[in-house]
Amino acid sequence: MQQNPTKTITLLGSTGSIGTQSLDVARMHGYRVFGLAANSRVELLARQIAEFHPAYVAVVDPEAYDRLEAMLAGQPDAPRLLKGPEGLRQLAAMDGPDVVLNAVVGIAGLAASLAAVESGHDLALANKESLVTGGHLVTDAVRRAGVKLLPVDSEHSAIFQCLQDAHAAKRLEKILLTASGGPFYGMTAEQLRGKTKADALKHPNWNMGAKITIDSATLMNKGLELIEAVWLFGLPEDKIQIVVQRESVIHSAVQFADHSVIAQMGVPDMRIPIQYALTWPDRLPSPVPELDFASMTKLTFGTADEETFRCLAACKKAIRKGGLGPCAANGANEEAVRLFLEDKIGFLDIGRLVEGVVDSDSFGGDYTLADVYECDKMARSYVLSHI
Ligand code: NAD
Ligand code: MG
């Protein structure tokens, strides 16, 4: 067992919801930060630099890069700056950290995940889109490099925690992937039709970035997580059952050959799974409050309504098709969510467009990274031509 938990991390997507909570964990345990990366929120990034003194900082948006460069001009201990998607990739590959935590949102995180793994780093992965778009590239690279892929997504962390008994893990029969159901649980298509972005951005249990909050309202997030679970745990889609657990207290569960079920529980706070990915296989004290069983009066369960929430049905179809199917679903969703957040399409259009792209091709077979980007582009243009 490690006596001194001091670690050095590189954190990609440091200005986001997962990024800032990761820095809470780093602060609490005195972790060093080798590198930080973000897209554009340079004021926050500058505060993070002043506190954590990273050696390198990547800024993807070129205008934001120029602003940060100007803000840091003349500071003797300023970090070296890297620019654009290539800068992000370079930072992910650099020697220095014990682990790279990828909390970028969207397919923009894929190249960085691959770069981190291919250069021999353990990868703590919040960016589920890496596995959804390039699942076989990422998992092949992890195998080749002999590194660890540590899930940060709360459900996948829960499953991972339930599978720590390596002997029992060989007898895994089924995964019970929990879902809160989101803000629109139980509603009909008719009730969903007029939902606005303000309605969809109100999540009952979690406070997250805008894209994943919309994904939670459409159940796309659960579809992406189903695909993520297939890649992480090696079970086929039909052995992963989605269970609605309204309070987000049971973060997921596993069922073994003897039908014994083990679940992981806790208050809904991402700092638990973030910290577990960083301290695994150890556990350290956490600032997160305990689950209070004395005041918890009920746990509510239900099923996910795929007939109404078409994104989930589309993700299932996509993983069954295999190959680039999930990448196409993801690309269509990223584009559709962007349009929804700009008030250009309605709530139900998101599912219609994601399902439309999945139905438009067979998608099977092996693929390269270039194929992934090509498919992503195709899915986005499908969306733009079908709104
Ligand atoms: P967010 O929008 O709050 O933050 C996203 C981060 O990515 C920011 O730091 C932003 O600067 C960076 N970014 C955006 N576009 C980029 C680009 N093109 N290149 C490089 N960096 C870019 O998102 P979030 O809620 O923190 O989610 C991050 C990832 O974690 C997503 O994949 C999400 O699905 C996953 N996740 C989030 C939560 C949560 O509670 N927020 C839970 C589980 C999984
Ligand atoms: Mg999740």
Image: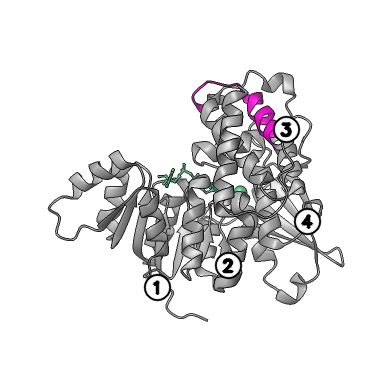
Identify the colour scheme used.
one colour
Give the mark, 4 or 3, whose residue is nearer the N terminus.
Answer: 4
Q: Within the image, what quadrant is residue 387 found in?
A: top right
Locate residue 250 relative to residue 138 in the image: left or right.
Answer: right
How far apart, in angstroms, are the residues tagged by discs 2 and 4? 20 Å
Question: Which residue has dot 4 on it?
Answer: 236
Q: Is 343 in the magenta?
A: yes
In this rendering, which labeled residue sits more in front, label 1 or label 4?
A: 4
* Callout 1 touching callout 2 (CB < 8 Å): no
Q: Within the image, what quadrant is residue 335 found in?
A: top right
Q: Position of residue 250 (x, y in %)?
A: 68, 52
Label 1 within 8 A of ligand 1 by Cβ: no
Give the mark, 1 or 4, whose residue is nearer the N terminus.
Answer: 1
How far apart, in angstroms, are the residues tagged by discs 3 and 1? 45 Å
Q: Position of residue 87 (x, y in %)?
A: 35, 54
Question: Which residue has dot 3 on it?
Answer: 310
The answer to whether residue 133 is above or below residue 163 is above
Question: Which residue has dot 2 on it?
Answer: 142
Question: Which residue has dot 1 on it?
Answer: 6
How far apart, in angstroms, are the residues tagged by discs 1 and 4? 38 Å
In this rendering, which labeled residue sits more in front, label 1 or label 2?
A: 2
Give the mark, 3 or 1, whose residue is nearer the N terminus.
Answer: 1
**Residue type at numbered disc 2:** Val
Name the residue rendered at 46%, 46% in the picture: 17
**Residue type at numbered disc 3:** Arg
Q: Secondary structure at mark 4?
A: loop
| Residue placed most toward the observer, 126 or 118 | 118
**Residue type at numbered disc 1:** Thr
Locate residue 135 relative to residue 57 in the image: left or right.
Answer: right
Q: Is 193 in the magenta?
A: no
In this rendering, which labeled residue sits more in front, label 2 or label 4?
A: 2
Give the mark, 3 or 2, whose residue is nearer the N terminus.
Answer: 2
